[in-house]
Image (tube, rainbow, N blue to C red):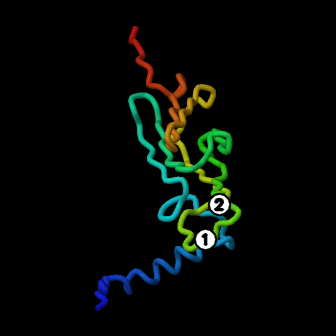
Amino acid sequence: MVIRVRDPFATLLEPQRAMENVMGSDWFGARTSGSGAFPLINAFKDGEDFVVVAELPGVKKEDLDIQVRGDTLRIQGKKTISYDENASVHRRERAAGQFDRTLSLPEGIDAAKVSAEYRDGVLTLRLPRAESAKPRTVTIN
């Protein structure tokens, strides 16, 4: 006996999925945000710093290239998956290949002071605000 569970809303989402497939195809270039994007990113403010955390399981540190230019952060790299020469792949769900993710940053980031830490497949970037972007108290004479 086979039990099948059907989502009654699945047909309502079909047009959205079709559009995501088209927008994510090579015709429009790589996805830069949202569902299916790689790496998955969380970005938040922590005190005076802007912090970006990216999940990059299976990616080697030396295969990453991180750039900050103006108000744009770019994370590029490649993920490789190797198999034994005698292996015959039965199912392939883990993606491999080149990736390129771009994120708009808030104004006033000091690119010269950006720091990066990569541990256990998680990249953490701390992007401090430039001194000129911080509020300044003005004394009245």
Helix, strand or loop at mark 1: loop
Q: Residue furthest front?
A: 86
The crowd level at tag 2 (other Cα within 10 Å; few <14, some 14-19, many 20+) is: few
> Quarter holding the N terminus?
bottom left
Q: Would you say 61 lies left or right of 93 here?
A: right
Question: Quarter of the image holding residue 118?
Answer: top right
Residue 121: x and y in percent read 52, 44
Is residue 14 or residue 64 the one in the foreground?
Answer: 64
Is residue 138 or residue 135 the one in the foreground?
Answer: 135
* In the rendered image, the vertical position of residue 126 relative to residue 54, given as above or below: above
Residue name at image x 62 percent, y 44 percent: 60
Amino acid type at circle 1 is Val
Residue 67: x and y in percent read 66, 40
Alpha carbon distance from label 1 to label 2: 8 Å
Q: Which mark is residue 83?
A: 2
Helix, strand or loop at mark 2: loop
Residue name at image x 65 percent, y 49 percent: 76
> Quarter holding the C terminus?
top left
Amino acid type at circle 2 is Tyr
Q: Would you say 57 lies left or right of 12 here?
A: right
